[in-house]
Image (cartoon, coloured by chain):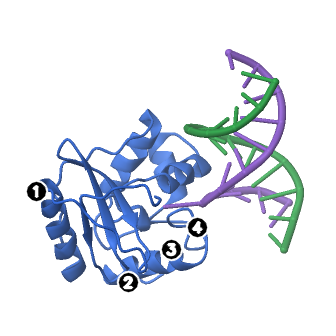
Chain colours: A blue, B green, C purple
Amino acid sequence: MNATTSYQAIIPSPIGPLGIVMERGQLCRIGFLSDETALQAAEDKPAAQVAAQLQHYFKQADWHFSLPLQPAGTAFQQKVWWQLQQIPMGEVRTYGEIARALGSGPRAVGNACRNNPLPVVVPCHRVVAANGPGGFAGQTRGRNISIKGWLLAHEGVTL
DNA sequence: TTAGGTAGTCTCG
DNA sequence: CGAGACTACCTAA
């Protein structure tokens, strides 16, 4: 996520501005923007749909996303991201649990989560470490961990 | 608290 | 291709 990224929509949210990237009508990336970043978003009909659903979620956590997703990644990453989508709202899994379900290892799962291009929609925030909060958006502490905490609290989860 | 093990990905060469 | 380094980890001692 950088200055050269062009978004089809940008929406405000309780966790800061979110940038939406579409390709051929499918959602392929969501980015956390800084408040100072005043970017112009091109108007795009499918992106408006994504924006609306995100706003539903922020208003009411118990919201089931129904969107055409197209996250780019390896076969293993796709499997992990699919597993994440099976975690019900308000529940969490550990990296180890996801790993066992896939016959893989915890660190590999962490790697895949770190590379999740669709945070919030693909709920990587519902994956935590066996003793600790784990990381979020590439960080193990700092602002992104706060965001993870906010999302979980929003869903009624207390770590 | 740490030491060692683990799986996937990336970077060199 | 292969070796080595790098992780949002886990378990045993």
Mark 4 on the same chain as mark 2: yes
Say how many tags the image has.
4
User: Judging from the image, what secondary structure is the residue with disc 3 in?
Assistant: helix
Q: From the viewer's perspective, is A108 left or right of A90?
A: right
Q: Position of residue A107 (x, y in %)?
A: 61, 51
Chain designation of label 4: A
Q: Tell me where residue A42 sits by quadrant.
A: bottom left
Q: Nearer the viewer, mark 4 or mark 2?
A: 4
Question: Given contact means CB atoms under 8 Å apart, are the residues at marks 3 and 4 in contact?
Answer: yes
* Disc 3 from disc 1: Cα separation: 29 Å
Given the image, on which type of amino acid does mark 2 rest?
Answer: Ala
Mark 3 on the same chain as mark 4: yes
Given the image, on which type of amino acid does mark 1 rest?
Answer: Lys
Q: From the viewer's perspective, is A130 left or right of A72?
A: right
Q: Which mark is residue A45?
A: 1
Q: Residue at 42% of width from left, 34% of height from top?
A: A75
Q: Nearer the viewer, mark 3 or mark 1?
A: 1
Question: Given contact means CB atoms under 8 Å apart, are the residues at marks 1 and 2 in contact?
Answer: no
Q: Position of residue C9 (x, y in %)?
A: 60, 60
User: Judging from the image, what secondary structure is the residue with disc 1 in?
Assistant: helix
* Disc 3 from disc 4: Cα separation: 6 Å
Q: Which mark is residue A144?
A: 3
Q: Which residue is mark 4?
A: A139
Q: Residue at 44% of width from left, 77% of height from top?
A: A147
